[in-house]
């Protein structure tokens, strides 16, 4: 039975990766803006960014999905299930990624910035070539961990009709009346994808360590 369920449920792997990857990408880009706002010298900007991050993080992901997919049509903004899922998860990812970036930046000693300025390096050069590469290496394990968590959260997209892994597992369970086997297959697929992500992030981390000379 599992040999029949596997190809049926595996149909959702592509969309699962697409939703997860797009959400992590957009959330990561918005997170860069947020972390810049949090570190802004303007108190009002810092306050708005901090409020956004705190509010987004405490609201459950499924609530965001329902607010976006079922709520926005009331304002004449209709989205497809995939669009709603990506927007919802991007909003969530932006808050968490901002905190990850902030932790990475805080790990870099202030002395390195001072040394760079003492050598006559500009702010852009200092941030782009000295601070950012080190901060990214420090933040990479946390980014990978969050990415795996986002992959698992993407299963919630099935509640609004996105045809990802969990959606096909539910359909397989209904058609075969083998719910246990269907969700075991889904669980194995999530585990395999998570292991691949962890392995890739580990290899990237090792390359970065060698490049910047960190043991």
Image (spheres, grey):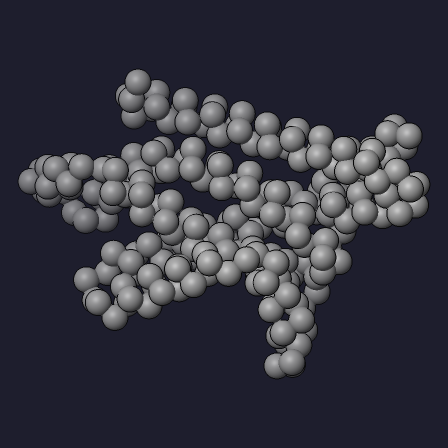
Q: Nearer the viewer, residue 156 or 84?
A: 156
User: Does the image show residue 190?
Assistant: yes
Which residue sits at x=31%, y=43%?
103
* Viewport quadrant of the C terminus: top left
- Decide: is 94 above or below 204: below
Which residue sits at x=59%, y=27%?
195
In the picture, measured across the screen, residue 149 lies left or right of residue 192, that is: left
Which residue sits at x=51%, y=49%?
25
- Decide: is 46 above or below 182: below
* Viewport quadrant of the N terminus: top right
Residue farthest to the top, as pictured: 215
Within the image, what quadrant is residue 100 found in?
top left
- All told, the count of numbered labels is 0
User: Does the image show residue 116?
Assistant: no
Residue farthest to the bottom, as pictured: 75
In the picture, measured across the screen, residue 28 lies left or right of residue 36, that is: right
In the picture, measured across the screen, residue 83 lies left or right of residue 203, that is: right
Within the image, what quadrant is residue 42 found in?
bottom left
In the picture, measured across the screen, residue 105 lies left or right of residue 163, that is: left
Which residue sits at x=55%, y=38%?
148
Residue 77 point in image, percent of width and height: 64, 76
Residue 79 point in image, percent of width and height: 67, 68
């Amino acid at each position: 039975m599992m040999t029949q369920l596997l190809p049926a449920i595996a149909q959702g792997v592509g969309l699962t990766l697409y939703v997860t990857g797009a959400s992590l990408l957009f959330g990561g880009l918005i997170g860069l803006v947020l972390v810049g706002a949090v570190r802004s010298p303007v108190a009002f900007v810092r306050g708005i960014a901090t409020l956004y991050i705190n509010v987004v993080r405490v609201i459950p992901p499924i609530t965001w999905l329902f607010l976006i997919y079922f709520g926005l049509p009331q304002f004449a903004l209709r989205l497809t299930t995939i669009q709603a899922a990506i927007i919802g998860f991007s909003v969530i990812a932006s808050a968490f990624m901002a905190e990850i970036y902030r932790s990475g930046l805080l790990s870099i000693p202030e002395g390195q910035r001072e040394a760079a300025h003492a050598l006559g390096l500009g702010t852009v050069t200092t941030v782009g070539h000295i601070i950012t590469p080190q901060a990214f290496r420090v933040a990479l394990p946390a980014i990978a961990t969050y990415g795996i968590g986002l992959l698992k959260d993407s299963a919630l997209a099935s509640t609004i009709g996105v045809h990802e892994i969990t959606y096909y597992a539910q359909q397989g369970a209904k058609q075969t009346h083998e719910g246990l086997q269907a969700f075991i297959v889904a669980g194995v697929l999530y585990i395999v994808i998570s292991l691949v992500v962890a392995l890739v992030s580990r290899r990237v981390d090792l390359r970065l360590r060698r490049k910047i000379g960190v043991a």
